[in-house]
């Protein structure tokens, strides 16, 4: 148990006995019985004077069994001896207890400047708790950022071509193509896998043509089917139950003299695609419930991560709309097709995330960089950002990011890809061998003018084997 002298020294500044008994007494009970944190107090010789019951049970000790024991024997990685020796508190340190990684803090106890012991507390019982809290913080940050951006300007572009990273020929060709198209008053289709940065290109194309004009983003998959027409084209008063008395302008109308950005437009239903075609061809809209068409002038930027030809063949995309939107196409290559850009992204987002987390700079080992370079990144840049955040959280208290900080899913995916490639290569090799064998048999039969006995000798195989091969490859030779 904790000695009375030590308790008294901790709270020596209290002015009255009432305060000590009524207020501090309650705080002390919570401090020592707090079910959310573990507490250990040692004397100046690093011998345990108090340990909470949960910690005793975890260490396999009877109640009170820890008293008088050397903390270094109970918890070899404990920093209490060091903080008693130096007088310096250590907060947020990761250490291991019985194979379980914990995050804790240790503080020296002083009386009149002299160190008389130390207090150790476990702040987080698992690293997952830190990750959960960090994810929640990031979620809140994103929400705040979203509302700030919306408040500043709901319909404006944020990025320019200067924000697009990369030095590969593939990304430079995409940027150059997008820049050339941005100078023309034509609609644009941006094609690329999920996470390649299609929205970044859309913002940049608009910014290059005049960033002071409205940039209206339309997230097509998020629009409910039954509201798609009213959201895109607007509605007149009384158009349907619940409609605003004054009516409402649709996204296209709001984008007048600017840009309407249809993100993942391939998800739009066929009925809306027909109306979209009219908008693109005639540059006019008709509100739901209205009787008059209204001329509008705007550019349309569309994106898709699905092959529109495939949807066209399935009857899920209109042919006339397909030919209308595929005049000016910007193709954004996936990361696996421009691996030389991966180190640039890793370095950029490492610095950016460390800055946002307010963490000191960290180095990345060559081994980790090789892993990230050779990974296929099916989720592209969006996945890379997510992985870098996971890595930094795991390497919170390390100066160098090493292999152990890389998420296991990366290695699992690489193993599966390797097995798939091996299987694919094996199938290809077998196919090549079969084709070559068939060609050799036909060549031998041609050489011997169809004499199977001579052909078998020429092929160095038994005649019975030759007959089996002829049957297997369905070779008929008279």
Image (cartoon, rainbow, N blue to C red):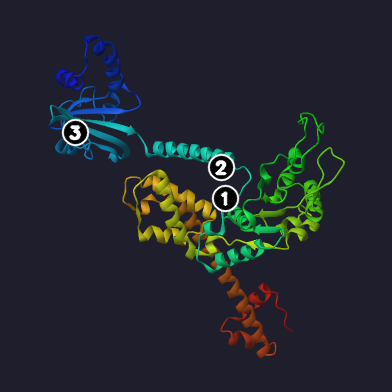
Q: Is residue 464 visible?
A: no
The residue under label 3 is 71
Q: Quadrant of the N terminus?
A: top left
- For residue 158, the mark is 1
SS state under label 3: helix
**Residue at point 56%, 38% (across, down):** 147
Indicate left or right for 202 with 108 as reference. right
- For residue 149, the mark is 2
SS state under label 1: loop
Q: Are marks 1 and 2 in contact (CB under 8 Å)?
A: yes
Q: How far apart in space, not on screen, are marks 3 and 2 (Cα)?
A: 52 Å
For marks 3 and 2, give the one nearer the viewer: 2
Q: Residue lying farthest front?
A: 212
Q: How far apart in space, not on screen, are marks 1 and 2 (Cα)?
A: 9 Å
Of residue 59 and residue 166, the one placed in the foreground of this image is 166
Residue 51 against residue 435 in the figure, above or below = above
Q: Counting residues from the N terminus, which is met first, the one under dot 3 or under dot 1?
A: 3
**Residue 314 point in image, percent of width and height:** 76, 55
Of residue 405 and residue 7, the one placed in the foreground of this image is 7
Q: Counting residues from the N terminus, which is met first, the one under dot 1 or under dot 2?
A: 2
- For residue 219, the mark is none
Of residue 102 and residue 335, the one placed in the foreground of this image is 335
């Amino acid at each position: 148990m904790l000695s009375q002298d030590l308790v008294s020294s901790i709270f020596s500044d209290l002015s009255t006995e009432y305060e000590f008994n009524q207020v501090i007494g309650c705080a002390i009970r919570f401090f020592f019985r707090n079910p959310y944190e573990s507490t250990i107090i040692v004397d100046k010789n690093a011998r345990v004077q108090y340990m909470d019951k949960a910690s005793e049970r975890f260490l396999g000790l009877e109640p009170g069994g820890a008293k008088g024991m050397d903390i270094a024997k109970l918890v070899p990685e404990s920093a209490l001896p060091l903080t008693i020796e130096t007088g310096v508190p250590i907060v947020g340190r990761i250490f291991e207890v019985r194979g379980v990684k914990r995050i804790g803090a240790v503080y020296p106890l002083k009386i009149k400047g002299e160190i008389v012991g130390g207090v150790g507390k476990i702040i987080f019982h698992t690293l997952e708790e830190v990750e959960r809290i960090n994810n929640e913080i990031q979620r809140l940050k994103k929400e705040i950022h979203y509302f700030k951006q919306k408040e500043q300007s709901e319909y404006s572009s944020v990025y320019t071509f200067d924000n697009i990273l990369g030095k590969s020929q593939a990304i430079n060709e995409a940027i150059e193509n997008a820049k050339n198209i941005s100078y023309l008053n034509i609609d644009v289709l941006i094609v690329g896998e999920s996470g390649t940065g299609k929205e970044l290109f859309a913002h940049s194309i608009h910014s290059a043509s005049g960033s002071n004009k409205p940039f209206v983003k339309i997230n097509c998959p998020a629009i409910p089917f039954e509201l798609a027409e009213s959201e895109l084209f607007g509605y007149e008063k009384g158009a349907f139950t619940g409609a605003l008395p004054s009516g409402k302008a649709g996204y296209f109308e709001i984008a007048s003299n600017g840009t309407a950005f249809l993100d993942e437009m391939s998800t739009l239903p066929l009925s809306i695609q027909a109306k979209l075609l009219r908008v693109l061809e005639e540059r006019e809209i008709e509100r739901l419930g209205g009787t008059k068409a209204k001329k509008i002038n705007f550019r349309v930027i569309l994106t898709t991560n699905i092959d529109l030809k495939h949807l066209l063949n399935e009857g899920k995309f209109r042919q006339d709309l397909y030919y209308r939107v595929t005049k000016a196409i910007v193709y954004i290559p996936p990361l696996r097709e421009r691996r030389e850009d991966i180190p640039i992204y890793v370095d950029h987002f490492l610095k950016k995330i460390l800055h946002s987390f307010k963490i000191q700079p960290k180095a990345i080992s060559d081994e980790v960089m090789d892993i990230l370079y050779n990974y296929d990144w099916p989720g592209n840049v969006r996945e890379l950002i997510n992985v870098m955040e996971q890595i930094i959280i795991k390497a919170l208290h390390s100066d160098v990011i090493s292999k152990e900080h890389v998420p296991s899913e990366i290695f699992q995916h690489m193993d599966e890809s390797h097995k798939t490639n091996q299987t694919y290569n094996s199938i290809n090799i077998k196919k090549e061998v079969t084709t070559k064998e068939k060609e050799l048999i036909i060549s031998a039969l041609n050489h011997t003018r169809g004499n199977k006995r001579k052909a078998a000798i020429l092929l160095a195989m038994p005649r019975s084997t030759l007959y089996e091969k002829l049957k297997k490859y369905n070779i008929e030779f008279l």
